[in-house]
Image (cartoon, grey):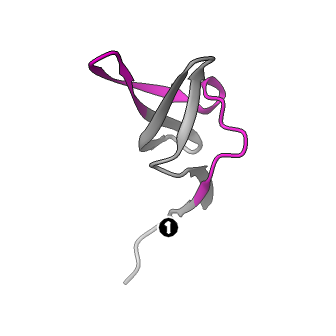
Amino acid sequence: MTMNVIKPGTQVDLAEDVQGTVTDVMVSGESDIQYKVSWWNGRSRCHEWFQAFELDNAGCERASIGFHNGVSE
């Protein structure tokens, strides 16, 4: 199975005037993808997990990740 995810290091829009950077990608279940995004709020660094639909990610750089189902000998 192969999935296309937003590439870590990519800038995404969180709100009209807030941009963050994707720092981690988490896949759970068969197709649930979440992204940990970091951004600055004044002098504080914030981190939060988001679903893809919560991010303005149109045109974002993507990366393919793959999984092997089973064990190779």
Identify the secondary structure beneath mark 1: loop
- Using the image as rendered, state which of residue 38 and residue 36 is in the foreground: 38
Q: Is residue 41 left or right of residue 53?
A: left
Q: Residue at x 33, y 15 (%)?
A: 42
Q: Which residue is mark 1?
A: 68
- Using the image as rendered, state which of residue 12 and residue 33 is in the foreground: 12
Q: Residue at x 56, y 23 (%)?
A: 14
- Tell me the kind of residue under disc 1: His
In reply to whether residue 54 is colored magenta, the answer given is yes
Point out the stretch of residues depicted in magenta: 37-63
In this view, 54 is above or below 65:
above
In this view, 13 is above or below 9:
above
Q: Position of residue 38 (x, y in %)?
A: 38, 31
Q: Residue at x 56, y 45 (%)?
A: 30
**How many numbered marks appear?**
1
Q: Residue at x 57, y 18 (%)?
A: 17
Q: Position of residue 73 (x, y in %)?
A: 37, 84
**Which residue extends farthest right?**
58
Few, some or many C-alpha atoms within 10 Å of disc 1 (few <14, some 14-19, many ≥20)? few
**Which residue extends farthest bottom?**
73
Q: Position of residue 2 (x, y in %)?
A: 61, 61
Q: Position of residue 13 (x, y in %)?
A: 59, 28
Query: Which image quarter: residue 48?
Result: top left
Q: Is residue 14 left or right of residue 27?
A: right
- Using the image as rendered, state which of residue 52 and residue 8 is in the foreground: 8
Query: Which image quarter: residue 1?
Result: bottom right
